[in-house]
Image (spheres, rainbow, N blue to C red):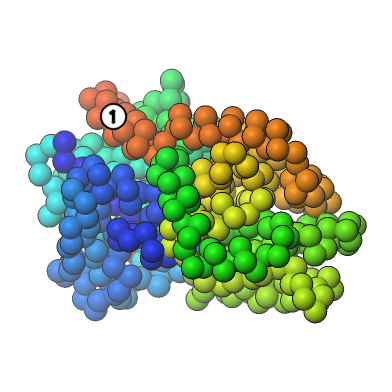
């Protein structure tokens, strides 16, 4: 089979280059080995790009990477607008942060349609398409409109929230209906899948039976595929990384003090403010922990042109400086706060240096930092993971110290517990987590999805009885929007 993987952000194959977000980092090695073609945005835009899609194509392992310049007129409305100021906040249950307009939605659909046209050049007999994430909810429907009959799968890397929250997204109905053009829709957790099914039954009146829903496109299978990492490769990288200059400098600077580490994109879903407040609280309630433990927080700037992200960056900088001012000493800085990204090879070494990994998002599809922190530990002396129960990873990593990120005192207590946990308990917890990581690798995830996609296409037959006319056509909402 000839596989075409599509995502907005793509990654090049260099371990020392910073990578933004778990999706690109996770896909890189599997795509490299599978021989698939990975298509995504080049990060550049082009005037009149819709007329002739321009793709820069380079080799990527056994396959290829194709980076497209997206249409200049629609990029902002698509990326900063509908994808990241309507869908992202809603998918993370932050409807209060939705800021969007009709033009954004129009641009989102234009870019989906543009991508569909661009993909035709990669279509051969036996091709299957695998679309990633919320940037391309309608891409499957666009491909079907262009006559593509091959298998098309979709995987959502973020959570799928409860139906009332989905209802806050403008054009939600049209978008979910468009998603039913996919043969297979994959989710990170059972809760996400159940929420989607809840929406289909309550809002669209569709019946989902044994994970299969029927629409005018035929059947779509809804299934859970928790994304993993390559724990062995990560462990090897971590062992090697201890000699990296950044990692040795960090170790030397610690003077015997313990280290907690947080590595996140600077995003409101990551719970960074609550996390800093928890450390503040811990040092206030247990002054004996001052000087003996500090936090290294790497917060990589992301989506900076969006107001909510700019505001968060300011709020965090202020908060960190207040906490450092309150607890710091002439020779001790409680929080080292860095606004830049690091390559996987350095991160692996930083994780291994830290006795505690803090991963405390308010909502997260999976969170691969949690898995990477665990894989990077020294088996004889592993660190402790403090993990939000609202990260998808908590389903598997249930021997981490699970916390509620809204409970600042509870988090402060858990971090203190982690810092003083005896070796036997640390090892028991860590070994149980490693077992889960070995059982659900990224290679397994990739293979399971591709197998299920092939099967679901075989099952799919167009529905002879058309759906209620009120649900169709897909593009009924705003008649003055032009999509093609
Ligand atoms: C999350 C999303 C990805 C996205 C990444 C980085 O992990 O699920 O689709 O690529 O964040 O965000 P960015 O907007 O910088 O690509």
Q: Secondary structure at mark 1?
A: helix
Quadrant including the N terminus: top left
Q: Nearer the viewer, residue 185 or 38?
A: 38
Residue 154 vertical position relative to residue 23 in the rendered view, above or below: above
Q: Identify the residue at image location x=51%, y=68%.
A: 246
Residue 217: percent from left, percent from top: 28, 35
Q: Identify the residue at image location x=19%, y=54%.
A: 64
Question: How many numbered dots are placed on residues in this image?
Answer: 1
278 displayed left or right of 71: right
Residue 451: percent from left, percent from top: 28, 29
The outermost residue toward the top is 210
Q: Which residue is mark 1?
A: 451
Q: Quadrant of residue 294?
A: bottom right
Q: Nearer the viewer, residue 382 or 316?
A: 382
Q: Does residue 300 appear in the picture of this structure?
A: no
Q: Nearer the viewer, residue 79 or 254?
A: 254
Label 1 environment density (alpha carbons within 10 Å; few <14, some 14–19, many ≥20): few
Residue 336: percent from left, percent from top: 66, 70
Residue 362 vertical position relative to residue 330 in the rendered view, above or below: above
Ligand 1 within 8 Å of the CB at mark 1? no
Q: Does residue 207 appear in the picture of this structure?
A: yes
Q: Identify the residue at image location x=55%, y=48%.
A: 373
Residue 71: percent from left, percent from top: 27, 71
Residue 246 vertical position relative to residue 445 in the rendered view, above or below: below
Quadrant including the C terminus: bottom left
Q: Identify the residue at image location x=43%, y=58%.
A: 345
The outermost residue toward the left is 125
66 displayed left or right of 243: left
């Amino acid at each position: 089979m000839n596989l075409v993987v599509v995502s907005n952000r793509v990654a090049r194959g260099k371990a020392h280059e910073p990578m933004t977000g778990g999706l690109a980092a996770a896909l890189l090695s599997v795509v490299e080995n599978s021989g698939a073609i990975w298509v995504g945005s080049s990060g550049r835009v082009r005037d009149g790009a819709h007329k002739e899609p321009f793709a820069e194509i380079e080799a990527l392992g056994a396959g290829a990477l194709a980076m497209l310049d997206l249409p200049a007129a629609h990029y902002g409305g698509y990326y900063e607008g509908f994808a990241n100021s309507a869908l992202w906040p809603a998918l993370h249950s932050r409807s209060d942060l939705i800021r969007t307009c009709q033009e954004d939605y129009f641009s989102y659909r234009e870019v989906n349609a543009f991508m569909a046209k661009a993909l035709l050049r990669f279509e051969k007999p036996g091709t299957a398409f695998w679309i990633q994430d919320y940037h391309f909810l309608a891409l499957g429907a666009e491909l079907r409109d262009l006559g593509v009959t091959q298998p098309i799968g979709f995987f959502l890397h973020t959570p799928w929230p409860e139906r009332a929250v989905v209802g806050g997204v403008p054009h939600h109905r049209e978008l979910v209906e468009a998603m039913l053009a996919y043969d297979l829709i994959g989710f990170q957790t059972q809760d996400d899948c159940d929420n989607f099914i809840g929406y289909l039954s309550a809002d669209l009146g569709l019946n989902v039976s044994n994970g299969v829903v029927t629409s005018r496109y035929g059947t779509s299978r809804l299934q859970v595929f928790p994304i993993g990492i390559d724990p062995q490769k990560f462990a090897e990288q971590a062992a090697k990384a201890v000699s990296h200059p950044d990692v040795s400098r960090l170790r030397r600077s610690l003077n015997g003090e313990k280290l907690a580490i947080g590595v996140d994109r600077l995003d409101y879903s990551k719970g960074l403010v609550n996390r800093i407040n928890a450390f503040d609280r811990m040092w206030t309630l247990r002054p004996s922990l001052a000087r003996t433990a500090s936090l290294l927080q790497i917060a990589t700037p992301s989506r900076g042109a969006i107001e909510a992200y700019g505001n968060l960056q300011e709020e965090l900088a202020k908060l960190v400086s207040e906490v450092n001012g309150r607890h710091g000493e002439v020779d001790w800085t409680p929080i080292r706060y860095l606004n830049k990204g690091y390559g996987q090879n350095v991160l692996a070494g930083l994780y291994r240096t830290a006795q505690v990994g803090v991963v405390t998002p308010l909502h997260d599809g999976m969170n691969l930092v949690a898995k990477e922190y665990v894989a990077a530990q020294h088996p004889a002396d592993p660190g402790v993971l403090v993990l939000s129960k609202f990260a998808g990873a908590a389903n598997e990593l249930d021997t981490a110290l699970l916390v509620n990120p809204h409970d600042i005192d509870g988090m402060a207590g858990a971090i203190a517990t982690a810092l003083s946990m005896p070796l036997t308990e640390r090892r028991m917890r860590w070994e149980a987590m490693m077992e889960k990581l070995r059982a659900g690798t990224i290679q397994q995830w990739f293979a399971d999805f591709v197998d299920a996609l092939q099967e679901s296409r075989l099952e799919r037959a167009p529905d002879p009885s058309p759906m209620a006319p009120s649900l169709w056509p897909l593009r009924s909402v705003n008649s003055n929007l032009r999509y093609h």
